[in-house]
Image (cartoon, rainbow, N blue to C red):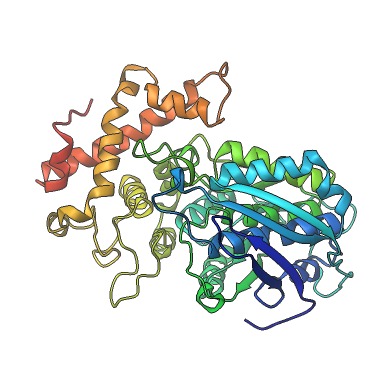
Amino acid sequence: MKTRGSQIPLTLDPGRGSSVIELMEGRDFRLDVGGIASRLSVSIPRRMNDLLRIAASVYVCDRIIKRPRRSVPDWQRSLRLKLRVSDLAFWSSPSHALLLAEMLGFLTGDDWNFEFTDGGPSLAPQHTEYWISSSGSAPPYVCLYSGGLDSAAGFVQHLKDVRDSHVIPVMVRHQLGQRRVVEKQFDLLKSRFGATIAPLLVKFAMRRPAALGMKEENTQRSRSFLFCAVGGTVAALGGASCVDMYESGIGAVNLPLMSGMVGAKATKSSHPYFLRSVSSLISAVAGSDIRIQLPYAGMTKAEVVRGLSTDSEMRQLAISTVSCVHYPLHNIGPKQCGRCPACIFRQQAMAAAGIVESDSTYAYGLFADNRGADSIPQSKLLCLKAFLMQISKLSAVEDGQLPPVLARHLIGTGIVGATEPLGCYLDLYRRYRREWVELIADRQANSVAWATLFGPVTIT
Protein backbone atom coordinates (compact mmCIF):
# COMPACT_ATOMS: atom_id res chain seq x y z
CA MET A 1 0.00 0.00 0.00
CA LYS A 2 1.07 3.58 -0.59
CA THR A 3 2.12 5.70 2.36
CA ARG A 4 0.05 8.85 2.72
CA GLY A 5 -0.19 11.60 5.28
CA SER A 6 1.15 11.37 8.79
CA GLN A 7 2.44 8.12 10.24
CA ILE A 8 1.23 7.29 13.76
CA PRO A 9 2.64 4.40 15.81
CA LEU A 10 0.57 1.54 17.18
CA THR A 11 1.98 -1.02 19.60
CA LEU A 12 0.41 -4.46 19.91
CA ASP A 13 1.25 -7.03 22.57
CA PRO A 14 -0.34 -10.33 21.45
CA GLY A 15 0.50 -12.13 24.71
CA ARG A 16 1.40 -15.83 25.04
CA GLY A 17 5.08 -14.89 25.20
CA SER A 18 5.09 -13.40 21.67
CA SER A 19 7.12 -10.33 20.82
CA VAL A 20 5.56 -6.89 20.85
CA ILE A 21 4.59 -5.73 17.36
CA GLU A 22 5.18 -2.17 16.19
CA LEU A 23 2.86 -0.96 13.44
CA MET A 24 2.59 2.41 11.77
CA GLU A 25 -0.76 3.86 10.76
CA GLY A 26 -0.26 5.44 7.36
CA ARG A 27 2.43 2.96 6.44
CA ASP A 28 1.11 -0.47 7.42
CA PHE A 29 -2.59 0.36 7.24
CA ARG A 30 -4.84 3.28 6.47
CA LEU A 31 -8.54 4.05 6.67
CA ASP A 32 -9.41 6.94 4.38
CA VAL A 33 -10.82 9.18 7.12
CA GLY A 34 -9.97 12.24 5.06
CA GLY A 35 -12.20 10.92 2.30
CA ILE A 36 -15.19 10.94 4.67
CA ALA A 37 -14.52 14.56 5.61
CA SER A 38 -14.02 15.53 2.00
CA ARG A 39 -17.11 13.71 0.78
CA LEU A 40 -19.39 15.28 3.38
CA SER A 41 -17.63 18.66 3.33
CA VAL A 42 -17.16 18.74 7.09
CA SER A 43 -14.37 18.52 9.60
CA ILE A 44 -14.45 15.38 11.70
CA PRO A 45 -14.45 16.09 15.46
CA ARG A 46 -11.51 14.79 17.45
CA ARG A 47 -13.41 12.03 19.24
CA MET A 48 -14.92 10.68 16.02
CA ASN A 49 -11.54 10.76 14.36
CA ASP A 50 -10.21 8.77 17.30
CA LEU A 51 -13.10 6.29 17.05
CA LEU A 52 -12.39 5.61 13.39
CA ARG A 53 -8.68 5.15 14.02
CA ILE A 54 -9.32 2.85 16.98
CA ALA A 55 -11.72 0.74 14.91
CA ALA A 56 -9.20 0.49 12.06
CA SER A 57 -6.39 -0.40 14.48
CA VAL A 58 -8.50 -3.10 16.15
CA TYR A 59 -9.36 -4.60 12.77
CA VAL A 60 -5.70 -4.73 11.75
CA CYS A 61 -4.69 -6.41 15.01
CA ASP A 62 -7.55 -8.88 14.65
CA ARG A 63 -6.27 -9.84 11.19
CA ILE A 64 -2.59 -10.31 11.97
CA ILE A 65 -2.81 -12.32 15.20
CA LYS A 66 -3.75 -15.95 14.64
CA ARG A 67 -6.08 -17.58 17.12
CA PRO A 68 -4.84 -20.50 19.21
CA ARG A 69 -6.36 -23.72 17.96
CA ARG A 70 -6.27 -26.15 20.86
CA SER A 71 -4.57 -24.80 23.96
CA VAL A 72 -7.00 -21.98 24.78
CA PRO A 73 -10.78 -22.47 25.13
CA ASP A 74 -13.00 -20.71 22.59
CA TRP A 75 -10.04 -19.47 20.51
CA GLN A 76 -9.59 -16.58 22.92
CA ARG A 77 -6.64 -14.21 22.52
CA SER A 78 -5.36 -11.56 24.93
CA LEU A 79 -4.55 -8.40 22.96
CA ARG A 80 -3.03 -5.23 24.39
CA LEU A 81 -3.00 -2.13 22.23
CA LYS A 82 -1.17 1.12 22.84
CA LEU A 83 -2.18 3.95 20.53
CA ARG A 84 -2.38 7.70 20.38
CA VAL A 85 -5.65 9.64 20.56
CA SER A 86 -6.44 13.31 20.32
CA ASP A 87 -9.01 13.32 23.16
CA LEU A 88 -7.10 11.50 25.86
CA ALA A 89 -9.47 12.47 28.70
CA PHE A 90 -12.46 10.91 26.94
CA TRP A 91 -10.86 7.60 26.03
CA SER A 92 -9.06 7.21 29.33
CA SER A 93 -12.23 7.59 31.39
CA PRO A 94 -13.08 4.25 33.07
CA SER A 95 -16.63 4.17 31.68
CA HIS A 96 -15.63 4.63 28.03
CA ALA A 97 -12.59 2.36 28.25
CA LEU A 98 -14.73 -0.37 29.84
CA LEU A 99 -17.49 0.03 27.25
CA LEU A 100 -14.96 -0.33 24.42
CA ALA A 101 -13.26 -3.37 25.93
CA GLU A 102 -16.49 -5.18 26.84
CA MET A 103 -18.06 -4.48 23.46
CA LEU A 104 -15.03 -5.89 21.64
CA GLY A 105 -14.81 -8.81 24.05
CA PHE A 106 -18.37 -9.81 23.22
CA LEU A 107 -17.91 -9.27 19.48
CA THR A 108 -14.63 -11.15 19.03
CA GLY A 109 -14.48 -13.43 22.07
CA ASP A 110 -11.08 -11.99 23.01
CA ASP A 111 -9.64 -10.12 25.99
CA TRP A 112 -8.90 -6.54 24.85
CA ASN A 113 -6.86 -4.02 26.83
CA PHE A 114 -6.08 -0.46 25.70
CA GLU A 115 -3.49 2.08 26.71
CA PHE A 116 -4.13 5.51 25.26
CA THR A 117 -1.54 8.26 24.98
CA ASP A 118 -1.87 11.85 23.88
CA GLY A 119 -1.01 12.80 20.33
CA GLY A 120 -3.61 11.67 17.77
CA PRO A 121 -4.10 13.76 14.61
CA SER A 122 -6.95 16.18 13.98
CA LEU A 123 -8.36 16.59 10.50
CA ALA A 124 -8.61 20.06 9.07
CA PRO A 125 -11.89 20.98 7.32
CA GLN A 126 -11.94 20.03 3.66
CA HIS A 127 -14.36 21.37 1.08
CA THR A 128 -14.81 19.56 -2.19
CA GLU A 129 -18.00 17.83 -3.27
CA TYR A 130 -20.94 19.01 -1.18
CA TRP A 131 -23.77 16.56 -0.61
CA ILE A 132 -25.44 16.98 2.77
CA SER A 133 -27.58 20.09 2.69
CA SER A 134 -27.28 22.72 5.38
CA SER A 135 -30.01 23.83 7.77
CA GLY A 136 -33.58 23.31 6.74
CA SER A 137 -33.26 19.91 5.07
CA ALA A 138 -34.15 16.54 6.51
CA PRO A 139 -31.27 14.32 7.70
CA PRO A 140 -30.12 11.69 5.22
CA TYR A 141 -31.04 8.03 5.43
CA VAL A 142 -27.85 6.11 6.28
CA CYS A 143 -27.36 2.37 5.89
CA LEU A 144 -24.47 -0.07 5.80
CA TYR A 145 -23.91 -1.74 2.45
CA SER A 146 -21.59 -4.59 1.50
CA GLY A 147 -22.81 -5.62 -1.93
CA GLY A 148 -23.84 -9.03 -0.62
CA LEU A 149 -27.26 -10.65 -0.74
CA ASP A 150 -28.50 -9.29 2.61
CA SER A 151 -27.56 -5.69 1.88
CA ALA A 152 -28.95 -5.78 -1.67
CA ALA A 153 -32.25 -7.33 -0.56
CA GLY A 154 -32.61 -5.02 2.41
CA PHE A 155 -31.78 -1.91 0.42
CA VAL A 156 -34.25 -2.78 -2.33
CA GLN A 157 -36.95 -3.38 0.27
CA HIS A 158 -36.23 0.03 1.77
CA LEU A 159 -36.37 1.75 -1.63
CA LYS A 160 -39.73 0.11 -2.24
CA ASP A 161 -41.14 1.11 1.15
CA VAL A 162 -39.73 4.62 1.54
CA ARG A 163 -38.80 6.99 -1.27
CA ASP A 164 -36.14 9.00 0.56
CA SER A 165 -34.64 11.99 -1.18
CA HIS A 166 -31.27 11.65 0.57
CA VAL A 167 -29.83 8.14 0.79
CA ILE A 168 -26.25 7.36 1.84
CA PRO A 169 -25.24 3.70 1.65
CA VAL A 170 -21.92 3.40 3.52
CA MET A 171 -19.36 0.81 2.58
CA VAL A 172 -15.84 0.11 3.85
CA ARG A 173 -13.88 -1.20 0.89
CA HIS A 174 -11.57 -3.81 2.34
CA GLN A 175 -11.44 -6.17 -0.65
CA LEU A 176 -10.26 -5.67 -4.22
CA GLY A 177 -13.06 -5.33 -6.75
CA GLN A 178 -15.75 -4.30 -4.25
CA ARG A 179 -16.15 -0.81 -5.68
CA ARG A 180 -16.85 -2.03 -9.20
CA VAL A 181 -19.45 -4.52 -7.99
CA VAL A 182 -21.44 -2.13 -5.78
CA GLU A 183 -21.32 0.78 -8.22
CA LYS A 184 -22.92 -1.46 -10.82
CA GLN A 185 -25.62 -2.37 -8.29
CA PHE A 186 -26.25 1.29 -7.42
CA ASP A 187 -26.54 2.26 -11.09
CA LEU A 188 -29.24 -0.38 -11.52
CA LEU A 189 -31.14 0.74 -8.41
CA LYS A 190 -30.94 4.42 -9.31
CA SER A 191 -32.47 3.79 -12.71
CA ARG A 192 -35.04 1.38 -11.36
CA PHE A 193 -36.35 3.37 -8.39
CA GLY A 194 -35.43 6.91 -9.38
CA ALA A 195 -33.78 7.36 -6.00
CA THR A 196 -31.09 9.88 -5.14
CA ILE A 197 -28.41 7.48 -3.96
CA ALA A 198 -25.09 9.01 -2.92
CA PRO A 199 -22.91 6.09 -1.83
CA LEU A 200 -19.95 6.72 0.43
CA LEU A 201 -17.29 4.11 -0.27
CA VAL A 202 -14.51 4.43 2.29
CA LYS A 203 -11.26 2.73 1.40
CA PHE A 204 -9.35 0.65 3.91
CA ALA A 205 -5.91 -0.63 2.95
CA MET A 206 -3.23 -2.57 4.77
CA ARG A 207 -0.07 -4.45 4.01
CA ARG A 208 -0.75 -8.13 3.72
CA PRO A 209 0.01 -10.02 6.95
CA ALA A 210 2.65 -12.00 5.06
CA ALA A 211 4.48 -8.74 4.33
CA LEU A 212 4.50 -8.07 8.06
CA GLY A 213 5.95 -11.51 8.71
CA MET A 214 2.66 -12.95 10.00
CA LYS A 215 -0.14 -15.28 8.97
CA GLU A 216 -3.64 -13.93 8.47
CA GLU A 217 -6.47 -14.79 10.89
CA ASN A 218 -9.50 -15.68 8.80
CA THR A 219 -12.26 -15.12 11.38
CA GLN A 220 -11.84 -11.31 11.51
CA ARG A 221 -14.67 -10.90 14.02
CA SER A 222 -13.95 -7.19 14.60
CA ARG A 223 -14.82 -6.13 11.06
CA SER A 224 -18.37 -5.21 12.08
CA PHE A 225 -16.99 -2.69 14.61
CA LEU A 226 -15.13 -0.92 11.81
CA PHE A 227 -18.24 -0.84 9.62
CA CYS A 228 -20.45 0.44 12.43
CA ALA A 229 -17.93 3.10 13.44
CA VAL A 230 -17.82 4.47 9.90
CA GLY A 231 -21.61 4.29 9.49
CA GLY A 232 -22.21 5.91 12.87
CA THR A 233 -19.78 8.72 12.05
CA VAL A 234 -21.52 9.45 8.75
CA ALA A 235 -24.91 9.48 10.50
CA ALA A 236 -23.69 11.84 13.21
CA LEU A 237 -22.09 14.23 10.73
CA GLY A 238 -25.24 14.23 8.61
CA GLY A 239 -27.61 14.81 11.51
CA ALA A 240 -29.19 11.35 11.33
CA SER A 241 -30.03 9.40 14.47
CA CYS A 242 -29.78 5.86 13.15
CA VAL A 243 -27.96 3.57 10.76
CA ASP A 244 -29.73 0.59 9.22
CA MET A 245 -27.91 -2.73 9.03
CA TYR A 246 -29.52 -5.21 6.65
CA GLU A 247 -29.61 -8.58 8.34
CA SER A 248 -32.54 -10.89 8.91
CA GLY A 249 -33.66 -11.86 12.38
CA ILE A 250 -32.35 -15.40 11.88
CA GLY A 251 -28.93 -14.10 10.87
CA ALA A 252 -28.79 -11.58 13.73
CA VAL A 253 -29.75 -14.13 16.41
CA ASN A 254 -27.38 -16.66 14.79
CA LEU A 255 -28.38 -19.63 16.92
CA PRO A 256 -25.25 -21.86 16.99
CA LEU A 257 -25.48 -24.83 14.65
CA MET A 258 -23.53 -26.98 17.10
CA SER A 259 -23.05 -26.88 20.86
CA GLY A 260 -19.33 -26.05 20.58
CA MET A 261 -19.89 -22.90 18.55
CA VAL A 262 -19.39 -20.40 21.36
CA GLY A 263 -17.11 -17.43 21.93
CA ALA A 264 -15.19 -16.49 18.79
CA LYS A 265 -16.43 -19.62 17.02
CA ALA A 266 -19.76 -17.88 16.35
CA THR A 267 -20.02 -14.58 14.51
CA LYS A 268 -21.86 -11.79 16.32
CA SER A 269 -21.49 -9.12 13.63
CA SER A 270 -25.18 -8.16 13.78
CA HIS A 271 -26.05 -9.54 17.21
CA PRO A 272 -28.55 -7.24 18.98
CA TYR A 273 -26.41 -7.03 22.15
CA PHE A 274 -23.36 -5.96 20.12
CA LEU A 275 -25.41 -3.38 18.21
CA ARG A 276 -26.71 -1.91 21.47
CA SER A 277 -23.16 -1.75 22.85
CA VAL A 278 -21.58 -0.19 19.78
CA SER A 279 -24.50 2.25 19.54
CA SER A 280 -23.79 3.35 23.12
CA LEU A 281 -20.13 3.90 22.30
CA ILE A 282 -20.87 5.85 19.12
CA SER A 283 -23.48 7.94 20.93
CA ALA A 284 -20.99 8.81 23.67
CA VAL A 285 -18.42 9.80 21.07
CA ALA A 286 -20.92 11.86 19.05
CA GLY A 287 -22.62 13.46 22.03
CA SER A 288 -26.01 12.52 20.57
CA ASP A 289 -28.12 9.39 20.25
CA ILE A 290 -26.96 7.23 17.31
CA ARG A 291 -28.46 3.74 16.89
CA ILE A 292 -27.30 0.91 14.68
CA GLN A 293 -30.56 -0.93 14.06
CA LEU A 294 -31.97 -3.97 12.27
CA PRO A 295 -35.08 -2.97 10.30
CA TYR A 296 -35.75 -6.57 9.25
CA ALA A 297 -35.14 -8.26 12.60
CA GLY A 298 -38.63 -9.76 12.47
CA MET A 299 -38.09 -11.46 9.10
CA THR A 300 -36.29 -14.55 7.87
CA LYS A 301 -33.62 -14.20 5.22
CA ALA A 302 -35.93 -15.73 2.62
CA GLU A 303 -38.67 -13.23 3.47
CA VAL A 304 -36.28 -10.33 2.88
CA VAL A 305 -34.83 -11.87 -0.28
CA ARG A 306 -38.31 -12.52 -1.66
CA GLY A 307 -38.49 -8.81 -2.48
CA LEU A 308 -35.88 -9.46 -5.19
CA SER A 309 -37.95 -12.19 -6.85
CA THR A 310 -40.50 -9.82 -8.38
CA ASP A 311 -38.87 -9.36 -11.78
CA SER A 312 -35.86 -10.39 -13.85
CA GLU A 313 -33.71 -7.35 -13.02
CA MET A 314 -34.05 -7.81 -9.28
CA ARG A 315 -33.58 -11.58 -9.54
CA GLN A 316 -30.37 -10.96 -11.49
CA LEU A 317 -29.25 -8.53 -8.81
CA ALA A 318 -29.72 -11.25 -6.19
CA ILE A 319 -27.87 -13.83 -8.29
CA SER A 320 -24.94 -11.45 -8.85
CA THR A 321 -24.24 -11.09 -5.12
CA VAL A 322 -21.77 -13.23 -3.17
CA SER A 323 -22.12 -14.72 0.32
CA CYS A 324 -19.34 -17.32 0.62
CA VAL A 325 -16.94 -16.93 3.55
CA HIS A 326 -14.20 -18.41 1.34
CA TYR A 327 -14.76 -15.99 -1.55
CA PRO A 328 -13.06 -15.79 -3.91
CA LEU A 329 -12.20 -19.42 -4.52
CA HIS A 330 -8.89 -19.42 -6.33
CA ASN A 331 -9.82 -21.75 -9.13
CA ILE A 332 -11.44 -21.78 -12.53
CA GLY A 333 -15.21 -22.12 -12.23
CA PRO A 334 -17.58 -21.31 -9.35
CA LYS A 335 -16.41 -18.60 -6.95
CA GLN A 336 -18.59 -19.72 -4.02
CA CYS A 337 -18.05 -23.03 -2.24
CA GLY A 338 -21.70 -23.87 -1.54
CA ARG A 339 -20.91 -25.86 1.61
CA CYS A 340 -19.94 -23.24 4.23
CA PRO A 341 -22.66 -21.99 6.61
CA ALA A 342 -22.99 -18.68 4.72
CA CYS A 343 -23.45 -20.47 1.38
CA ILE A 344 -26.00 -22.90 2.81
CA PHE A 345 -27.96 -20.09 4.47
CA ARG A 346 -27.91 -18.20 1.16
CA GLN A 347 -29.03 -21.21 -0.89
CA GLN A 348 -31.89 -21.92 1.51
CA ALA A 349 -33.08 -18.30 1.34
CA MET A 350 -32.81 -18.09 -2.45
CA ALA A 351 -34.64 -21.40 -2.95
CA ALA A 352 -37.37 -20.52 -0.44
CA ALA A 353 -37.75 -17.11 -2.09
CA GLY A 354 -38.20 -18.74 -5.51
CA ILE A 355 -34.99 -17.44 -7.09
CA VAL A 356 -33.28 -20.10 -9.17
CA GLU A 357 -29.49 -19.99 -9.39
CA SER A 358 -27.50 -21.72 -12.08
CA ASP A 359 -25.64 -24.97 -11.46
CA SER A 360 -22.34 -23.09 -11.89
CA THR A 361 -22.96 -20.69 -8.97
CA TYR A 362 -21.44 -22.97 -6.34
CA ALA A 363 -18.75 -25.60 -6.29
CA TYR A 364 -21.31 -27.72 -4.40
CA GLY A 365 -24.87 -26.67 -5.22
CA LEU A 366 -27.43 -28.12 -2.83
CA PHE A 367 -30.60 -26.87 -4.49
CA ALA A 368 -29.77 -25.82 -8.04
CA ASP A 369 -29.75 -29.26 -9.65
CA ASN A 370 -31.02 -32.49 -8.10
CA ARG A 371 -28.61 -34.74 -9.90
CA GLY A 372 -25.66 -32.50 -9.00
CA ALA A 373 -26.71 -32.45 -5.36
CA ASP A 374 -26.57 -36.24 -5.25
CA SER A 375 -22.94 -36.21 -6.39
CA ILE A 376 -21.71 -34.13 -3.43
CA PRO A 377 -19.31 -36.18 -1.25
CA GLN A 378 -20.43 -36.85 2.32
CA SER A 379 -17.33 -35.04 3.61
CA LYS A 380 -18.66 -31.82 2.04
CA LEU A 381 -22.05 -32.08 3.76
CA LEU A 382 -20.96 -31.51 7.36
CA CYS A 383 -22.37 -27.97 7.62
CA LEU A 384 -25.58 -29.00 5.85
CA LYS A 385 -26.02 -31.85 8.34
CA ALA A 386 -25.61 -29.31 11.16
CA PHE A 387 -28.40 -27.19 9.65
CA LEU A 388 -30.65 -30.23 9.33
CA MET A 389 -29.95 -31.24 12.92
CA GLN A 390 -30.76 -27.72 14.14
CA ILE A 391 -34.06 -27.68 12.22
CA SER A 392 -34.92 -31.03 13.77
CA LYS A 393 -34.19 -29.72 17.27
CA LEU A 394 -36.47 -26.73 16.65
CA SER A 395 -39.52 -28.97 16.09
CA ALA A 396 -41.13 -27.74 19.34
CA VAL A 397 -41.94 -24.40 17.68
CA GLU A 398 -44.62 -26.18 15.65
CA ASP A 399 -46.45 -26.84 18.92
CA GLY A 400 -46.09 -23.25 20.09
CA GLN A 401 -43.19 -23.99 22.43
CA LEU A 402 -39.82 -22.25 22.47
CA PRO A 403 -37.06 -24.90 22.43
CA PRO A 404 -34.82 -24.62 25.52
CA VAL A 405 -31.68 -24.27 23.37
CA LEU A 406 -33.18 -21.21 21.67
CA ALA A 407 -34.48 -19.67 24.89
CA ARG A 408 -31.09 -20.08 26.56
CA HIS A 409 -29.38 -18.42 23.61
CA LEU A 410 -31.81 -15.48 23.49
CA ILE A 411 -31.46 -14.76 27.20
CA GLY A 412 -27.89 -15.91 27.77
CA THR A 413 -26.36 -13.75 25.03
CA GLY A 414 -28.38 -10.67 25.91
CA ILE A 415 -30.71 -10.56 22.93
CA VAL A 416 -33.59 -10.20 25.38
CA GLY A 417 -33.83 -9.84 29.13
CA ALA A 418 -34.89 -12.68 31.39
CA THR A 419 -38.37 -11.16 31.88
CA GLU A 420 -38.99 -10.02 28.30
CA PRO A 421 -41.51 -11.86 26.09
CA LEU A 422 -40.09 -14.29 23.56
CA GLY A 423 -43.19 -14.78 21.43
CA CYS A 424 -41.86 -12.87 18.43
CA TYR A 425 -38.86 -15.22 18.23
CA LEU A 426 -41.11 -18.25 18.51
CA ASP A 427 -43.05 -17.08 15.46
CA LEU A 428 -39.88 -16.12 13.57
CA TYR A 429 -38.29 -19.52 14.05
CA ARG A 430 -41.55 -21.30 13.25
CA ARG A 431 -41.61 -19.61 9.84
CA TYR A 432 -37.91 -20.29 9.31
CA ARG A 433 -38.28 -23.98 10.15
CA ARG A 434 -41.24 -24.34 7.81
CA GLU A 435 -39.17 -22.86 4.97
CA TRP A 436 -36.59 -25.57 5.51
CA VAL A 437 -39.16 -28.35 5.92
CA GLU A 438 -40.87 -27.43 2.65
CA LEU A 439 -37.53 -27.45 0.82
CA ILE A 440 -36.60 -30.80 2.38
CA ALA A 441 -39.97 -32.27 1.41
CA ASP A 442 -39.51 -31.11 -2.18
CA ARG A 443 -36.04 -32.68 -2.35
CA GLN A 444 -37.28 -35.89 -0.79
CA ALA A 445 -39.99 -36.05 -3.44
CA ASN A 446 -37.21 -35.82 -6.03
CA SER A 447 -35.13 -38.49 -4.26
CA VAL A 448 -32.24 -36.18 -3.39
CA ALA A 449 -29.94 -38.18 -1.11
CA TRP A 450 -29.09 -35.49 1.46
CA ALA A 451 -32.78 -34.74 2.09
CA THR A 452 -33.36 -38.27 3.33
CA LEU A 453 -31.00 -37.56 6.24
CA PHE A 454 -33.73 -35.49 7.85
CA GLY A 455 -36.29 -38.29 8.09
CA PRO A 456 -39.93 -38.28 6.96
CA VAL A 457 -41.54 -34.87 6.49
CA THR A 458 -45.22 -33.99 6.69
CA ILE A 459 -46.40 -30.61 5.37
CA THR A 460 -49.51 -29.31 7.17
Could you tell me which quadrant the N terminus lies in? Answer: bottom right
Query: Percent from the top left, x then y, of residue 155?
Result: 56, 53
The answer to whether 378 appears left or right of 122 in the picture is left
Pick whichever, 265 or 156, lies toward us: 265
The answer to whether 140 appears left or right of 134 in the picture is left
Pick whichever, 189 or 201, lies toward us: 201
Residue 197, quarter of picture: bottom right
Residue 60, quarter of picture: bottom right
Query: Percent from the top left, x then y, of residue 459?
Result: 21, 29
Query: Percent from the top left, x then y, of residue 117?
Result: 83, 58
- Figure check: 41 above or below 240: below
Give the residue displayed 41% in from the left and 59% down from the top: 325
Q: Is residue 77 visible?
A: yes
Residue 250, quarter of picture: top left
Q: Which residue in the rendered view is the most extreme toward the front? A: 17
Query: Percent from the top left, x then y, of residue 354?
Result: 32, 49
Give the residue displayed 83% in from the left and 64% down from the top: 120
- Figure check: 9 above or below 51: below
The answer to whether 158 appears left or right of 362 in the picture is right
Give the residue displayed 71% in from the left and 41% down from the top: 99
Q: Which residue in the rendered view is the most extreme toward the left? A: 447
Could you tell me which quadrant the C terminus lies in? Answer: top left
